[in-house]
Image: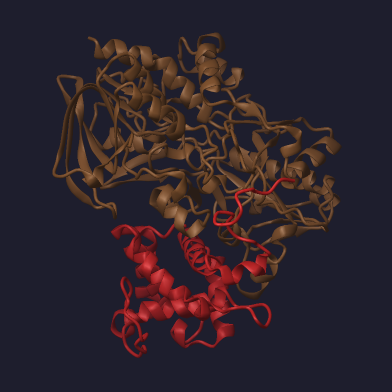
Amino acid sequence: MKLPRRRVVKAAVAAGLVAAGGVVAVVRTRGYEAPGRALVAVSPWQYAVLQHVARRFCAPDRDGVPDADAIDVAGFCDRWIAEMSPVTRKDLLGLLGYVEHVLPVTCGLGRRFTALPVEAQDRALSALERSSVDLLRGGFQGLKALIFLGYYRDPRTWSIAGYDGPLVRRPARGWWP
Amino acid sequence: MTVTRGRDVAGALRLDVDAVVVGTGAGGAAMLRELARAGLSCAALEEGGHHAPVDFTQREDEMFPLLFQEGGGRATSDLAIRVLQGRGVGGSTVHNTNLCKRTPPEILDLWARRHHVTGMGVRDLEPAFRTIEQDLSVSQIPDGQVNPNNEALRRGATALGWKNAALSHNRVGCQASGFCELGCAYDAKQNAVKVLIPQAVAAGARVFSDAKVDRVTTSNGRATGVAGHLLDDRGRPKAALDVRAKVVVLSASAVGSAWLARRSGLPDPHAQAGRSLRMHPGAVVAGRFRDPVHGHKGIPQSWECTEWLSFEEGSPRRTWIVPAFAHPIGTASTLPGFGRDHMARMRDYNRLAVLTAMLHDETSGVVEAEDTRPVLHYRMIEDDRAALARGLVACARILFAAGAIEVTFPAIPPVTVRSARELDALDTSFVRPHGTPLSAVHPMGTLRMGDDPRTSVVSSRGEHHQVKGLFVADGSLFPTSLGGPPQISIYAFALHLAKHVIASARG
């Protein structure tokens, strides 16, 4: 998946300063619960954003489907981000800052993303998906790809698609029409 | 062991050889074999790792970082087009779907007429194509091995009276697992790493993985070698790499070779290096069927529709239509939206047939060298956008003709149509960068060939116009888009140009 480049960060930061009046830097690290695990690439507030976005992206459509927390999507993302190039990592973390602090403001929502009710989070993410700023749309697609990589990598989710998984470690004969 | 892993080399690596080849994909492997068989001392340097079939677990999350540049996350600078390129010994031949089509005669003719390319006509290249097709056991996919997704393309195109045909692949002993794009666990791909690299090594070539080249060295207008560093098992620089050579061959792809040329500050008086990037950008259309299709199972891309593919410059019909199916992660990333609606769409996974329209593009992009990695700039021109939109609508018509009950364009927001008649009035303005997910797997044309130094970077012999002893043998050479899968052209061009490299090395 492509994760956003520097210009996403610049756009995010610029928009943030205008829209949020510079509040971002002051409040962005306060009021977050410790995740209860060791993080390797992201900070606790960034982990919280990943966790909330993952919950919305992977919201189950019926009972019995594992949710993003059960699959530990945010934890996977933390480990994946650790292996990214420094430039890509910086861009992605910049996007998380945008989602948390700027996106709600641009949508007329008064609180940071992780403090919003789920309906408002969905509204904010939809707005990001359809942003008039192309780079932000690209950033959304990158974030979506990362989250779904974390979710659909897990065999517990494969039944959603009726996917029967890899053939290796099963009898060598493959599938023929 | 035929490949030395850079991560296992103690200390710096310093070599003095006749020829060094940068990259081990189709072009690099073919060139390396020819140079070694000619008796030259030669080495190939590959920035990625060396992987065996046992490493290919058929899992997307494990194979993306192993086989693709930037973990599968490479994209254009505006993030509009995802660019999938191979990384590792064998390059993109490890993850591709084995499509083998010769360079269209119309394209070779265009290059001769408009781009001052000489000695690359159909007859000139015939021996190289014949050789590589034999070497790689290229053959047409038999009727009985066409899977339902490809069968839908055949059925729909035939019903519409549109040109369609079986494709040829380089596979032997195929298990039809459908996991080709994640590397073949059954070693059935007759590709660069399985066929050509071992032959090159048997002829005396040395091959190093985890060896990243940062610059081409020159002296008095002649290439003298390359410099870079060996990488550790996490891809971090661990020791110096310094290769002195009489000739240098860039085969690191249209992105990697252009990046290297620009980063090395090679003379470029007409500002041609890195320009004219073409990519065959494409998008997908998904048809939902009543009965299961199981598009991910069986041999991918065994059938094509060429009704909408003209090689005439400026033609409104410039898309090549083939099936395109992904495993769950790739599918989830492409399907529109998120949340419950998205998951509901995922439940149709096995009832989807997916087609892609791949654009024979005329947009001219640029590869720039930014610090340690390439940056791809590509702004699709309106004619290309419109041609792509026509191709996608054609895909939808094929799917309906094949029996789809509903067709979805994964646009933002998604566009779903329920009959072919609805397509007549469809507003296709959503087909644009950032309006629909676009991807590209065929970067080409950034160090293009031609005998006029004002409009090309290398001659028709593949040698750099300004730097003697520096050659190119990969998709960078193509002066325009090919309009079809490039691998067999890249292999053949390398074989065809090898004689010039050998002559240069022998001085």
Q: Position of residue A49 (x, y in %)?
A: 43, 78
Quadrant in the picture for residue B504: top left
- The quadrant of the rendering that contains the C terminus of chain B is top left
Q: Is residue B53 left or right of residue B353?
A: left
- The reply to whether residue B472 is in sight is no
Q: Height in image: B436 above or below B477?
A: below
Tell me how the rendering is colored.
by chain
Q: Residue at (55%, 42%) from the top-left corner?
A: B281
Q: Position of residue B376 (x, y in %)?
A: 40, 44
Q: Is residue B161 left or right of residue A44?
A: right
- The reply to whether residue A56 is in sight is yes
Q: Height in image: B215 above or below A84?
A: above
Q: Residue at (60%, 17%) from the top-left corner?
A: B105
Q: Position of residue B235 (x, y in %)?
A: 28, 52
Q: Is residue A47 left or right of residue B350?
A: left
Numbered disc total: 0
> Which chain has been coloured red in this picture?
A
- The quadrant of the rendering that contains the N terminus of chain B is top left
Residue nearer the viewer, B156 or A154: A154
Q: Height in image: B480 above or below B67?
A: above
Quadrant in the picture for residue B174: top right
Q: Height in image: B393 above or below B458?
A: below
Quadrant in the picture for residue B331: bottom right
> Which chain has been coloured brown in this picture?
B
Residue nearer the viewer, B318 or B286: B286
Q: Position of residue B202 (x, y in %)?
A: 35, 24
Q: Residue furthest front?
A: A171
Q: Is residue A136 left or right of residue B250?
A: right
